[in-house]
Image (cartoon, rainbow, N blue to C red):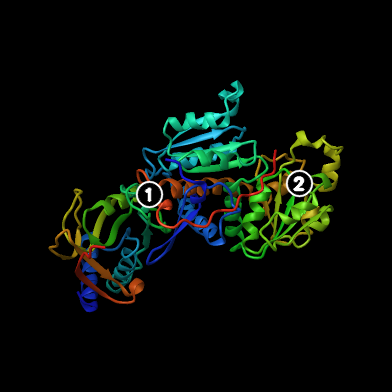
Amino acid sequence: MRFPSSLRGALRILTSTNVNYRFRDLLAIEPLSADEITFILDQSKPFQEIQRNPLKKLATLRGKTVALAFFENSTRTRLSFGTAAARLGADTMNLQAEASSLKKGETLLDTANNLNAMKPDCFVMRHASSGAADFVARHLEIPVVNAGDGTHEHPSQGLLDAMTIRDRKGSLNNLNITILGDIAHSRVARSNIHLLGKFGCRFTLCGPAMWVPRELEHIGPPGTPIRCVYRVEEALEDADVIIVLRVQTERLHEPSLSQNDYILLYQLNAGRMKLAKPDALILHPGPINRGTEITPDVADGPRSAVLEQVTNGVSVRMAILYLLMAGATEGEHPALEGKAAPQPKESAHASD
Amino acid sequence: MSAAEIDRTLQRLAHQIVEKSGGTRNLALIGIRRRGVPLAQRIARAMRGIDGVEVPVGTLDITLYRDDLSKVAPQAVLQSSHIAFPVDSMDLVLVDDVLYTGRTIRAAMNGLFDLGRPKRVSLCVLIDRGHREMPIEAQYTGRTVQTSDTEIIEVRLHEIDNEERVVLVDRVEA
């Protein structure tokens, strides 16, 4: 049986003591409400505690299998989802781009159907094309998790960034967020803006003009204050959180901008950090190009939370897998019973 | 069971635990969420009256350790566990409101052993209602009640429920 994609949103379940949400898939941050996001972050807390236990392995998802289908290369995200699955007691099946039959010309849907025929209970996928996870989710009955699709979204990264910010700042509300780098091509930036925009944050996007087009001022939730600036000094002023994106050095020579020019104009260094708030927090989704977008002393300094992000990544992904897979009964998914949540609106995918 | 009866029972359980443990040294209480938590705190308060010593109290959410997660819908909302002391070499007393099948305690022990290797684990419950499905018994029992499968023991504590009593009710078919 195929579920119409309109039924794949979240279902709100009210119990006597708690609000509980069931999710069918995790494809994007954009369709989620602030309450749903808060729920996922709250449910990640117990998993954060488990990372501190001497024995970190649970049997909660024993006997279940998570397919990790990485059509595009990834080290951190794949390891993080793999670790999350292992700590919940689930098994994983791995597909890696370089070793896959994609090279032999198999279509995305054929590959997904073949993996699905091995009966995983959840499908975690990364793909170079925006909208690829949405597309696969329309064809598979099992929950699909988007681990990054083209320049569209990277929802688990958005959630782990939010968790890190909430832990350090106490709340997500009304923060000044500065994002530095190649924002036009960044799915991380999009997920961050969609998520933090729902909590009233204000955004300053900064980088070379070809990476920070003015259209980006309209990508957030309606009414979200987003401004694009081209001087890093201006961007850092009053920042509560600075998200530094990786400079994809392969993109640096596209238009004429040398690595040295980028360092000179946009690198986050100790001198520039003085312009931000004294307690400004620095995030980076990794992998870091030390000495290019950020200096080592700043990346490793007390305001940097980059390794906390990595630790929180496992906690958030455990929560995602738990919420999507635990409690799912044979046959109908509980999120499909009764009235479904309103259909997440079809997001405008940037073609990659 | 009235509020006064609950209070007297907890006082007695506190005395029994201290007596059987030979004092409060290395002793800690672990309340199982949700209603085991206020019970553990009240027993700790009673112990302070006996020994003048603050016995550490931890809380444990067993949701992730349940063996029926794949059958239960809607799943429980996860709560935090807070055990702010090392459990290694400790004399731990698990505290819960009702002992029934024993599966909750099985799950709680799995959770505890992920935190370390306690020297001893014992179990203290307010009500033992029988119908065990696991080889688990309580060392400290407030009251043993004969029940049938169709009955429910409702423990209501003022910290959570704004009232204080234990009642036996018939399950109402929804």
Residue sitting at 42 percent across and 45 percent down? A325
Q: Which mark is residue B38?
A: none
Q: Which residue in the structure is indicated by mark 2?
A: A181
Q: Nearer the viewer, residue A304 or A331?
A: A331
Q: Nearer the viewer, residue A6 or A242?
A: A6
Q: Nearer the viewer, residue B40 or A12?
A: A12
In the rendered view, would you say A114 is above or below B26?
above
Residue sitting at 56 percent across and 29 percent down? A96
Q: Which mark is residue A327?
A: 1
* Mark 2 touches mark 1? (CB < 8 Å): no
**Where the N terminus of chain A falls, by quadrant?**
top left
Q: Give percent across and percent down for residue A227.
A: 77, 58
The reply, left or right, for residue A231 in relation to residue B149 is right
Q: Give percent across and percent down for residue B30.
A: 33, 59
Q: Amino acid at mark 2?
A: Gly
Report whether mark 2 lies on the same chain as mark 1: yes
Q: What chain letter is assigned to the residue under label 2?
A: A
